[in-house]
């Protein structure tokens, strides 16, 4: 071996040893400051924990591929767990107003991915790739006093769940396929759900109260229990919808159009149900004469609908079936 090669090997060894020492020192310093450089054990998995306790966050935005997202209210503190993600194609950023978690399909440039907004995290992560068959999960825990104004969650495949949150929060959920569940949620704002995949998405509402609910899906199964809304509009091409409609206002309207099986208050209808029956001779109310009624509108092609409303028996009998 040439003398020059031996010198290069020695220099490389020194650089490697210095790098290891720097990493070890960095781990110790970060641990003393409460920061996390490497993934750590979270239950039986490995991941990162990021704390946030601003009391008020404008938005939590998540854009990932194949993963589950769970949001839990009523926690002792506010923090995010990012579990089993590839550390080289995942970026987490946070400031006083927004928390963002973003994932790309692959690492395209070892020197960085500045154009996509995700920076390269270091060669040490390439040497420790995640186990491929591990379920990727994002857990968000909210303290009782934490107020998040909006959630914006977009995933290709996976499950999204929210539970025990009572703040005035916007929820925007977009999935290709998976399951979406809301339990013990109360908001005087909007829940907006989009499911664009060819595989049916299961949507569950249990003890949910929202000012506005919109669902747009190619294929979906929606089930509701103790579900209250002022305005609810669903456009589902193929699937099923089953729940009891409880409006926020004293008066309300129902408009359902589907070529699938349609049942309202135990009575079958051909392909349309409208309540109350529209009287073309009746003058429209003057502006400000009465409060705007709550509204339920369902539209579908091959959509099976089975709902219960608060219509009286006589009003239900007077409704025309087209």
Image (cartoon, helix red, strand yellow):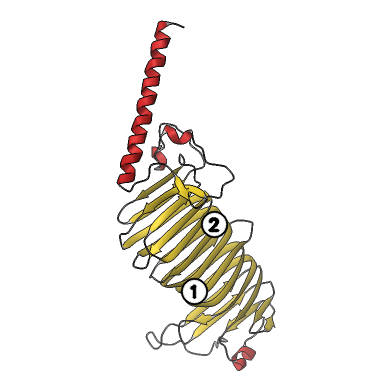
Is 248 placed above or below 26 here?
below
Q: How far apart are marks 1 and 2 (CA)?
A: 20 Å
**Picture quadrant where residue 274 is located:** bottom right
At 35% from the left edge and 39% from the top edge, which residue is drawn? 27
Instruction: Decide which of tag 1 and tag 2 comes sooner along the chain.
Output: 2
**Picture quadrant where residue 219 is located:** bottom right
Q: Which residue lies furthest to the bottom in this view?
A: 314
Is 199 placed above or below 73 here?
above
Secondary structure of residue under mark 2: strand
Q: Residue 246 carries which label?
A: none
Residue underneath mark 1: 208
Of circles 1 and 2, the one toward us is 1
Is 315 placed above or below 136 here?
below
Frontmost residue, 98 versus 317:
98
Return the x and y of residue 70 as percentages of the image width and height.
Answer: 49, 60
Return the x and y of residue 128 as percentages of the image width and height.
Answer: 49, 36
Q: Residue 175 carries which label?
A: 2
Horizontal side, residue 167 vs residue 133: left or right: left
**Dot 1 alpha-carbon crowd within 10 angstroms: few under 14, some 14 to 19, many 20 or more:** many
Is 307 placed above or below 12 here?
below
At 39% from the left edge and 57% from the top edge, which residue is drawn? 79
Frontmost residue, 254 versus 102:
102
Return the x and y of residue 103 as percentages of the image width and height.
Answer: 47, 46
Horizontal side, residue 151 vs residue 254: left or right: left
Return the x and y of residue 268 as percentages of the image width and height.
Answer: 69, 82
Secondary structure of residue under mark 1: strand
């Amino acid at each position: 071996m040439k003398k020059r090669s031996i010198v290069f090997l020695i220099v490389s060894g020194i650089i490697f040893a210095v790098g290891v020492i720097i990493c070890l020192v960095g781990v110790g310093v970060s641990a003393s400051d409460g920061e996390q450089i490497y993934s750590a054990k979270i239950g039986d998995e490995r991941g990162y924990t990021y704390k946030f306790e601003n009391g008020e966050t404008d938005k939590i935005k998540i854009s990932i591929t194949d993963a589950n997202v769970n949001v839990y209210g009523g926690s002792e503190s506010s923090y995010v767990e990012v579990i089993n993600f590839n550390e080289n194609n995942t970026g987490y950023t946070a400031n006083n107003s927004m928390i963002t978690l973003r994932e790309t399909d692959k690492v395209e440039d070892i020197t960085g991915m500045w154009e996509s907004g995700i920076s390269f995290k270091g060669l040490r992560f390439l040497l420790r790739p995640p186990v491929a068959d591990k379920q990727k999960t994002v857990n968000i825990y909210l303290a009782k006093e934490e107020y998040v104004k909006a959630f914006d969650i977009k995933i290709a495949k996976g499950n999204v769940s929210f539970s025990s949150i009572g703040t005035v929060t916007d929820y925007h959920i977009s999935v290709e396929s998976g399951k979406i569940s809301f339990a013990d949620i109360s908001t005087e704002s909007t829940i907006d759900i989009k499911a664009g995949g060819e595989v049916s998405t299961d949507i569950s509402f249990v003890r949910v109260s929202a000012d506005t609910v919109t669902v747009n899906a190619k294929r979906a199964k929606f089930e509701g229990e103790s579900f209250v809304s002022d305005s609810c509009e669903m456009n589902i091409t193929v699937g099923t919808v089953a729940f009891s409609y409880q409006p926020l206002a004293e008066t309300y309207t129902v408009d359902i159009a589907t070529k699938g099986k349609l049942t309202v208050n135990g009575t079958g209808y051909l392909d349309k149900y409208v309540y109350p029956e529209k009287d073309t001779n009746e003058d429209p109310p003057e502006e400000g004469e009465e409060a705007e009624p709550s509204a339920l509108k369902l539209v579908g092609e091959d959509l099976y609908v089975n709902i219960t409303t608060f219509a009286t028996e006589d009003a239900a009998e007077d409704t025309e079936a087209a």
